[in-house]
Image (cartoon, helix red, strand yellow):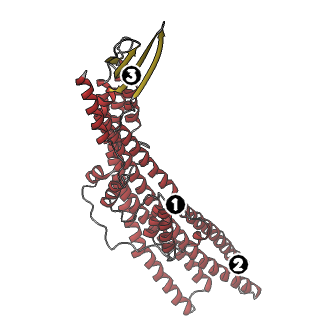
Amino acid sequence: MNALRKFMIAAVALLLGGCATFSEDGGTGKVSEALSARGLTQQAPWIKSEADADRAADQVRKLLAQPLSADAAVQIALLNNRGLQAQYAELGIAEADLVQAGRLRNPGFSFGRSHRGDEVEYERAFIFDLLGLLTMPVRTRIETERFQLAQNRLTAEILQVAADTRRAWIHAVAAQQSAAYGEQVRDAAEAAAELSRRMVRAGNFSKLDQAREQAFYADAATQLARSRQAALSSREQLTRLMGLWGQEIAYRLPERLPELPPALRDIADIEQQAMRQRLDVQGAMQEAANIASTLGLTRTTGWFSVLEAKYMRNSESGEPRQTGWEIELRLPIFDFGTARNARAEHIYMQAANRAADLAVRARSEVREAWGAWRTAYDLARHYRDEVVPLRARIAEETLLRYNGMLMSVFELLAESRQQVGAVIAAIEAQRDFWIADTTLQFSINGKSPGAIAAPGGGLRATAAAAEAGH
């Protein structure tokens, strides 16, 4: 009895001295390291207090005071996006589960009083969760792995928000640029239509040619309305991602997209790079490994699910005090744990196959993204270096012939319409390249559109079955 008492006292003292505690940064330090390793330079803080919110709001105001660059838009989104802050809460929940796993269930105390004639009996028992003590290292390791998965998911979500915001910024600037050019086209078409009306009144122009000029003006006005609506929609999408409202939505965008880089950077071993850095692939592989560990816990506890130690101290009227101990063990008579083990094995195979499938799709996606990136650059450079300059030379030659009275004004206008299509196509090609560049980076570092939404579900279910005993 003395040996058991000493063991219990030592176990309790050890647990009280080594209880799991919350980390100072809530696990965000590892997230910041992972983001930095993947090239994200913006800060992604966890807003926990009013002071944090005030600092973030002040930084947002400073960024909005200048024309909004793509990097500034990403920084505002990481500071201001409420959906991202909700994902931070998931990290806090995972850490709370980890801390809880490092603590035993509270011990129990029972007290009973009974009569036998004139005799009174008292029963006292101190109940200690012995199974929880024995399985604590395994449960703590499982919750540590879950916490790491939560950090992985948060990192992926931050990269997703950054990529979505950058793409939205590119769309918004390109749409604004197209709308501004559309205004110039509309104004020129309006002037040509007015000139045609005057020439018809003077008898120098046919009604058919006038109708053509009027039709071009009507088409230009229609296209301008569509361009303005596209610019508004793109801007609102960017506004939503940045979490702005009220007076904040009056931010200014640059007039033009960034110029194309002089040359494409060399990306070697792109598939291997994606396998090393893609968070969804890492998460799926880690989940499969974690479930394998949980499977061992399930098999360990398959024969019994309750193991409790009790220290008793009973007394009876007129009798010496009675002390002793008791161990409660639930016998596997009706349930030998075979169903629970089979379920855990199937969950593991599901996770392993899911990880393999995700790796195959990741390789394919990064190859596809690289091909789109390369093609988009070639097309944008072709429009910049060949098509637009060629149209400009044709317009210059047409103007020379018009000045020499070898062409009419409407032939000059017709050539200008051809140039309109080339300029708009060049803006779209430039936009498509920067979109492809953002998509390529995210396909290397982030996650697939069809990636597992919440890794760890199978792990949690398996561990829960092992701990609950069903």
Is there a contact, CB below 8 Å, between mark 2 and mark 1? no
In screen coordinates, is 224 left or right of 281? right
**The N terminus lies in quadrant:** top left
Is residue 170 in sight in this rendering?
A: no
Q: Residues within 10 Å of mark 2 (few under 14, many from 20)?
A: many
Q: Amino acid at mark 1?
A: Leu
Name the residue: 40% across, 32% down.
Answer: 106
Q: Residues within 10 Å of mark 1 (few under 14, many from 20)?
A: many
Depth order, front residue of 193/235: 235
Considering only order in the chain, which callout, 1 or 3, is on the residue closer to the N terminus?
3
Q: Position of residue 313 (x, y in %)?
A: 36, 20
Name the residue: 77% across, 86% down.
Answer: 201
Of tags 2 and 1, which is closer to the observer? 1
Q: Amino acid at mark 3?
A: Ala
Depth order, front residue of 388/287: 287
> Residue furthest toward the left?
3
**Which residue matches tag 3?**
125
Using the image, determine if residue 198 lies above or below residue 107: below
Is there a contact, CB below 8 Å, between mark 3 and mark 2? no
Of tags 3 and 1, which is closer to the observer? 3
In terms of secondary structure, where does tag 2 sit? helix
**Which residue matches tag 2?**
210
Q: Amino acid at mark 2?
A: Gln
